[in-house]
Structures are given as C-alpha cells and as structure tokens.
C-alpha cells in the first residue's frame, strides 16, 4: 500500500473486510539484506508466519511510514510505545 492514494483508509477497510487476503499477526521479526533486496521474516511467539521480500526503496518507504504512523498515534493518545529490550538489530 505504498502507492499514493487519497483512499488509504478505504483500501485498509476493504482489506480488513476481505476474505481473499491473508491476515498475519506477528510479534517478532528478523531482517536480512542483499545488494538488491531486503528480507523480513515475521514470527508469532517463535513460529514463522511469513517471509517478505522487498526492494530497498520500498523498505525505506515502509520504515518511514511506520515511524510517522507510530509518532502520530503517540501524539494523539499521549502514549509512548515501548520498543523491545532486545538490542540485536535483526529482531524486534
């Protein structure tokens, strides 16, 4: 959903209601990188759930969008979202 659209909320709403799209919950991840791509392994309580393969451009765009969304949420709710105590950068 990195494409520019005035309908992001509509896109998300449709995806949430769709039975054609897998919904994946994860609470752990690992990140890998090659010269051309990035890889993200998603896990839930240690069990592998999905493997994402994305370009560096998409990965950076995703990172910036997530950071902005979290900052907006923290500001609106007056809450600070904690990060994992794990300092290993390949995990959450």
Image: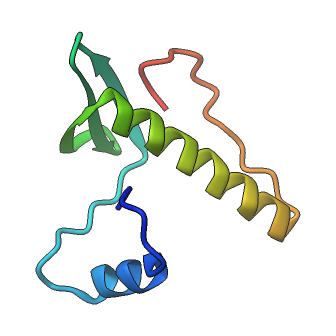
Is residue 86 shown left or right of residue 26? right
In this view, the residue farthest toward the top is 35
Give me the residue at 40% from left, 39% from top: 28
Q: Is residue 29 visible?
A: no
Give me the residue at 24% from left, 36% from top: 54
4 w.r.t. 55: above or below: below
Identify which residue, 91 or 9, lies in the foreground: 9
Q: Position of residue 11 (x, y in %)?
A: 36, 80
In this view, the residue farthest toward the right is 78
Q: Is residue 7 visible?
A: yes
Q: Position of residue 89 (x, y in %)?
A: 50, 17
Give me the residue at 29% from left, 19% from top: 32
Q: Where is residue 31, by image quadrant?
A: top left
Is residue 26 shown left or right of residue 9? left
Give me the residue at 84% from left, 61% from top: 75
Identify which residue, 70 or 80, lies in the foreground: 70
Colouring style: rainbow
Q: Where is residue 34, by image quadrant?
A: top left
Q: Position of residue 2 (x, y in %)?
A: 38, 56
In this view, the residue farthest toward the left is 20
64 w.r.t. 68: above or below: above
45 w.r.t. 38: above or below: below
- Numbered marks: total: 0
Q: Quadrant of the N terminus?
A: bottom left
Is residue 86 shown left or right of residue 71? left
């Amino acid at each position: 959903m990195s494409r520019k659209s005035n309908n992001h909320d509509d896109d998300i709403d449709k995806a949430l209601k769709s039975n054609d799209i897998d919904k994946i919950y994860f609470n752990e991840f690992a990140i890998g990188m090659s010269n051309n791509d990035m890889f993200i392994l998603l896990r839930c309580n240690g069990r592998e759930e999905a493997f994402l393969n994305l370009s560096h451009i998409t990965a950076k765009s995703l990172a910036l969008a997530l950071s902005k969304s979290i900052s907006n949420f923290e500001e609106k709710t007056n809450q600070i979202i904690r990060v994992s105590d794990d300092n290993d950068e390949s995990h959450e």
